[in-house]
Image (tube, grey):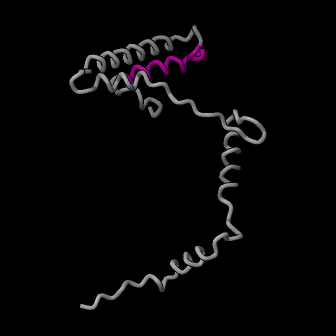
Amino acid sequence: MECYTRIPPSRRPIAVEDNQAADETSYSVSSPGHPGGNRSTRRLNEWRNDQWSATLESLHPEDQSLWRITKRVMRLPTPSPPLVTPGGIALSDPEKVEALADNLETQFQPVTDPSFPAVIEKFDVGLNPTSWRLPVNPS
């Protein structure tokens, strides 16, 4: 049942029934001979169309809902740039993971040569627990 979280509860028994019918056969879900795949896909598409129709009927220009849905539907997604590595463009997931791990490793190296000793000394003094004492307010 966990894989049907996006399907509403009223449609879940239909999807479970179709999956049980699919388990009884050796066909894949995408094959044309699948006994229940087309029916469940058709029912799911009908439900999605009903939901979209209900959404469109509920829009009113007075409350800006029509404008918001138009803006959301017309927006083109921003394409993300490719992940370029020294060996070329990372295409597969393991290549991307390796490229991101290398990038993070190079970014977070410990500083061995402090460039500003005065700033580091001031920071070390600020971290000293004896400097955390609150001023005593004489009353």
In the picture, the quarter occupied by the C terminus is bottom left
Name the dominant secondary structure of the magenta segment. Answer: helix
| Point 51% across, 14% down: residue | 37
Magenta residue span:
11-30
Question: Foreground: 35 or 115?
Answer: 115
Question: Foreground: 127 or 3?
Answer: 127
Looking at the image, residue 67 sits to the left or right of residue 104; the answer is: left
Looking at the image, residue 12 sits to the left or right of residue 91; the answer is: left
x, y percentage for residue 15?
43, 21
| Residue 24 placement: quadrant | top right
Residue 64 highlighted magenta (yes or no): no
Residue 29 highlighted magenta (yes or no): yes
x, y percentage for residue 76?
48, 25
Indicate whether 134 appears above or below 102.
Answer: below
In the picture, the quarter occupied by the N terminus is top left
Indicate whether 100 appears above or below 134.
Answer: above
| Residue 106 placement: quadrant | bottom right
**Which residue is situated farthest in the right direction here?**
87
x, y percentage for residue 46?
38, 13
Looking at the image, residue 8 sits to the left or right of residue 84; the answer is: left
